[in-house]
Image (spheres, rainbow, N blue to C red):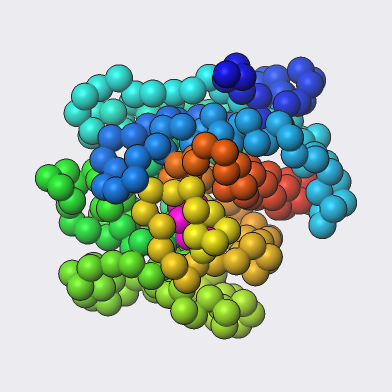
């Protein structure tokens, strides 16, 4: 077995030292409430490993995003048994890095963890909106006995009175659909993705505050691109159109932090791991272009 990768992008010391890095990568191999396929706890290590084989030059942006400094933190696993307490531990950890002025990239792990960095970003940056790329609405009041389930994470975000923009949704219950309708959650369904770019996306972005948190569930992508996820759904997003949406999001808004969750690596099929690593690095590049202009 290769040793556990601990450095996103396999960067030299001068680009991966915490004190000077603009970006902090926090691996959170957290898996408590998954419903179907397991394995998201192996997600962060698989993303880090794949990231070490990436080219650091971004041919679209024409610079090396790694030059802004990307420090990878030790994996963080909350200790509390109680899910709410565990999320509080993680929130505290996230808050430290945001307060230190870092752009925080949290690597999951299951989607339930996103509530912690979202709350931390809210505390540190004030009013934020939450952009969610996902196959699932995750708007349940609770699921399998806990309000902190992965299937309820965006309902908790709604409870925090934060504006949200879910993109690529194609799986939800009748109750979630009714809730979204009544609460005015502006869901962009997966079957509408082809018509999203342009005016509709601009109108939706305009409904969000200047500061935005991005939560990216890898099952947003079509399973033909990313089969390695616990609850795959057909009809998801494609690579380049998604990058164009992300580029515009990072250009139009100040994205203060993001997470990438729900990768459940499949042994011998590294393609999904590389999609996740490259997606993270593309987002860091879009962030760098915005932050350094
Ligand atoms: Mn999902």
The vertical placement of 163 against 81, above or below, is: below
The reply to whether the magenta stretch includes residue 219 is yes
Q: What stretch is highlighted in magenta?
A: 217-221
**9 shown above or below 110:** above
Q: Residue at x 57, y 58 (%)?
A: 225
- Provide the major secondary structure of the magenta segment: helix
Residue 289 horizontal/vertical position (percent): 76, 51
Establish if 3 lies above or below 263: above
Image-based side of 15 in relation to 144, left or right? right
Point 64% across, 57% down: residue: 250
**What residue is at 26 percent from the left and 47 percent from the top?**
35
- The residue lying toward the viewer, choosing from 118 and 265, is 265
Foreground: 121 or 195? 195
Residue farthest along the right direction in this orientation? 62
Left or right, residue 217 beside residue 248: left
Q: How many marks?
A: 0
Quick check: is 61 in the magenta stretch? no
- Quarter of the image for residue 33 reads top left
Task: Classify 235 as above or below 143.
Answer: below
- Which residue in the rendered view is the most extreme toward the front? 268
């Amino acid at each position: 077995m290769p040793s556990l990768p601990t450095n996103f992008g396999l960067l030299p010391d001068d680009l991966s030292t915490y004190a000077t890095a603009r970006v902090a990568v926090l691996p959170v191999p957290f898996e408590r409430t998954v419903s179907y396929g397991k394995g998201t706890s192996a997600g962060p290590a698989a993303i880090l490993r794949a990231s070490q084989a990436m080219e650091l030059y971004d041919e679209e942006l024409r610079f090396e995003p790694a030059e802004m400094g990307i420090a990878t933190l030790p994996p963080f696993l909350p200790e509390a048994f109680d899910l709410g307490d565990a999320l509080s531990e993680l929130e505290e950890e996230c808050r430290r890095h945001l307060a230190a002025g870092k752009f925080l990239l949290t690597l999951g792990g299951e989607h339930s963890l996103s509530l912690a960095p979202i709350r931390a970003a809210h505390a540190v940056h004030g009013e934020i909106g939450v952009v969610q790329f996902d196959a699932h609405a995750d708007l349940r009041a609770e699921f399998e006995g806990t309000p902190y389930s992965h299937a309820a994470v965006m309902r908790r975000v709604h409870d925090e009175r934060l504006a949200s923009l879910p993109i690529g949704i194609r799986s939800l219950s009748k109750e979630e659909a009714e809730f979204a309708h009544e609460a005015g959650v502006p869901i962009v369904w997966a079957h509408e993705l082809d018509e999203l770019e342009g005016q509709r996306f601009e109108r939706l972005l305009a409904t969000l505050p200047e500061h935005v948190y991005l939560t990216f569930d890898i099952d947003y992508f079509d399973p033909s691109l990313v089969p390695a996820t616990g609850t795959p759904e057909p009809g998801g997003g494609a690579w380049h159109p998604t990058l164009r949406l992300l580029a515009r999001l990072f250009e139009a808004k100040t994205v203060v932090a993001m997470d990438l969750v729900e990768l459940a690596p499949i042994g011998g099929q590294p393609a999904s791991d590389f999609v996740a690593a490259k997606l993270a690095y593309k987002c860091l590049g879009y962030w760098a272009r915005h932050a350094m202009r």
